[in-house]
Image (cartoon, helix red, strand yellow):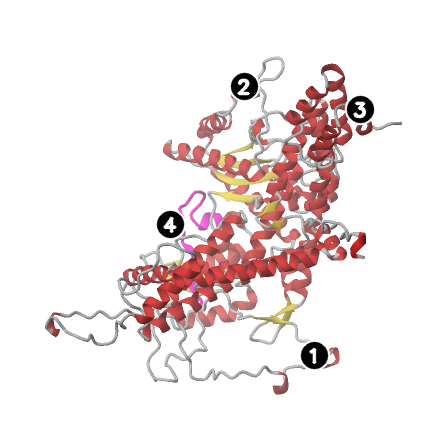
Amino acid sequence: MTSALDQSRQFGTRECHQWRDEQFFAPLPSLAEDLARAFITTARRHGNAAGNRWLARNAAELVEPSRVYRRFAPMAKDLKRAVMRISNAEPTLIEGHQAASRWLEDVSERLMAGPWNTTHDDEALVNYAKAQAKAVEDERNRLAGDMNRYNRALRLGLFSDDDAAPVASQGPLSKRAGHWATARAQARNAMSPAVTIASPLAELTFQRMRPMTLRIADELALKKAREKAAKHGIEPPNRNSASAFQLARLSSSRWWRRKLRRLSGRRIEQVQREGHRVHAQAGIYCSEMTLERRREQKTRNRALLETIEAINQEGQRYTLAELSELGLANADHRRAELMLRIRDTEVEARRLGHQGMFYTLTTPSRFHPVKSKSCRRNPKYDGATPRDAQQHLQALWAKARAKLARDGHSVYGIRVVEPHHDGTPHWHLLVWMEPHAEPHVTEVLRSYAEEESPEELADRRGRKTTARFKPVKIDPTRGSAAGYIAKYISKNINGQQFMEADRYDHSMATSAPRIEAWAAVWGVRQFQFVGLPSVTVWREIRRLTEKQEAELRQWEEATRPHPKASETLHLIRRAANAGQWDLFLRLMGGPNTPRKEQPIKPWIVQRVDTSRDDTSHATGEVQPEGWAEVKGRYGEPVSATWGLVVNDGRGGAEEYLTRVYRWTIQPIQRSQAEGSPGGREAGDAWTCVTNCTGVDSTPRNPPPAELAEQMKRFQAWRSSEEVRAEQEAAEIEGQSARATIGRMIQHDASAREILAARGIHIAPPSTEPEEFFPDELC
């Protein structure tokens, strides 16, 4: 059977055949048959010229799908299914190809974060993050080198007046730079005395140009590093922080790795949602790709925790994996604490006579990519992400709380966020309030929830639905509020207890990991308490168990706290250790008590290294303020919670230490039998730097005005003809090297195949015609 491509050659001349092949059929091999059939239909009806015009008009902006599939190979199958659905949704075949091409082109841009392909594996991401951090550090070092050259020239007096070294206005850059260099060399040195003095020496003024500091290199490198981050779609560090802290982040491979992982995961998941791969009939709550990436991440994290141990002052050793199972990282412990707080909050609300309400808030239709029942595409969807939907609900809740505060009403309880089957979040609010305030609170929440697109709230018969806002009054005779929300707590943690399947009849054993992966990739906080005391105080005071009774007594003997503060601490401590959240809530001032009025607050201090000496071994001088502060990874001071601050009832406060153990984190030391050199002197690293003198290597920063003046001079020097000529020569040399490498790759078939697998296509060298020699010369 003759193909449509062969039949299309029956129309037009050889030049027409060649034009159609080069412009449309060859660049679009997977679409060539469909285009050829459409061309034949048009040509038979209206002639060859009309068929050519149809191709030029309808096929000019089409994208070859196979190239996109090869470029993003890990999700090629999902992209193919999405393209098929998009194409079939259009009325005609060519309109389907055009819609799919527009979507593929948009997807190609979003799946590329600058030069980074977000579908590459984590090993490639780690290497790319290292390369970006090294590029920022290299740029900073290069600028520091340029600045060193400038300072050296300044010390040697090689800077002359602008009038002494005129520059030619015509000719190539290298010639003008040479002319300027010659004129400067022949000019009088500005640092040498003049041959003749026409005015008294007293009338002359001399101004010393200060050498430039490393701060200039940091500022210029920071500017380029922020541009690099923005090019990747990554939000740069906060401008309000110090430049040194910003540059430390941008030159850290860990910072780049964390940002790229987050960016890649969210872009991939959003493409999957738009590609109809996240709904009840496909990957519910999140895509299969996101679920697998989350599993790999948890496996990496678990393996890392197994290789690191913590040692306290008593010699106790635990791996971080063992310690994580004892804390709230354990899903069972997290669920138990949440249920305890909810249950006892309900107990206290009943004692106060407050009314409990359960509200469900849902986003408008424009946030949902598919319809709820049929799982078909939602025509109202505007491309919003789950984070956009979460921000919409947060803004709605903020406006409602502000309105209630103005009206003198307050609520307290818990907010639970969970996804619809298509990954769009919705809220469940379990809150309590005074009985007379319930109608007003309900109406305020309803008005803000239904403010946008109210026409969507009517069903086919014109009756108003509860799709956007659903209030349920808690009736104690029918069940407790804790029992009502227990299934939502279990569903969003690990799916154990309270329920076997979700509302879509999916087993919780498979749905719970998907919900956890959804919350992780989109950065959604699933549980948040409102109007209740600080849970940090609850957790810190529960550290003071019966085993720490002696340490607590010794602390009070040493600090001699006020009796009122000591009594308050012991009352709240007994309630917390007994697991009585309702009594803890009452002793902390009750619901909706402002933090500043609560009797206990966390004690947060800046960490210091007490092993450092307060005097310099080199000079004997007292160290400046902040000498013992512990700096973080990026040079910022590190704050930590050490205990609790208890009000004494007289306006003062007493401090209590709750962190009685001091832990040292280190990799697990392998034994000699496992091939490790151990901790002997022969195994220690040698260094040529003496660490006993306490050398202060902190850079000195000039005042802002001087820094701006130095930067202006430095930039003027870098833009001079001499420096530009050097850069031009380096660029020419680099272009020559790249061209040579490109020619070598062109003639290497294996290299071209490797690059093609990575999405980089290099054309083979053109076949040169054989050399012809006349017979008389042979």
Check residue 597 in the rendering and tell me which mark sits there, or answer none: 4
Q: Looking at this rendering, what residue extends furthest in the top direction?
A: 461
Up the image or down, 601 lies above or below 152; here it is: above
Please report the residue visible at 33 percent of the width from the left and 79 percent of the height from the top.
622
Disc 2 from disc 1: Cα separation: 71 Å
Q: Nearer the viewer, mark 1 or mark 3?
A: 3
Amino acid type, callout 2 = Glu
Q: Looking at this rendering, what residue extends furthest in the front direction?
A: 776
Q: Is residue 647 visible?
A: yes
> To which residue does mark 3 refer?
10
- Nearer-the-camera pick, 763 or 235: 763
Q: How many marks?
A: 4
Check residue 676 in the rendering and tell me which mark sits there, or answer none: 1
Residue 220 forms part of the magenta stretch: no
- Residue 221 percent across, percent down from the top left: 44, 60
Disc 1 from disc 3: Cα separation: 77 Å
Q: Are marks 1 and 3 in contact (CB under 8 Å)?
A: no
Amino acid type, callout 1 = Ser
- Nearer-the-camera pick, 400 or 612: 612
Crowd around label 2: few <14 · some 14–19 · many ≥20 (10 Å): few
- Nearer-the-camera pick, 581 or 697: 697
Crowd around label 1: few <14 · some 14–19 · many ≥20 (10 Å): few
Disc 2 from disc 4: Cα separation: 45 Å
Magenta extent: 585-607
Helix, strand or loop at mark 4: helix
Of mark 2 and mark 1, the one earlier in the sequence is 2
Q: Nearer the viewer, mark 2 or mark 1?
A: 1
Amino acid type, callout 4 = Glu
Check residue 123 in the rendering and tell me which mark sits there, or answer none: none
Q: Looking at this rendering, what residue extends furthest in the right direction?
A: 1
Q: Is residue 569 visible?
A: no
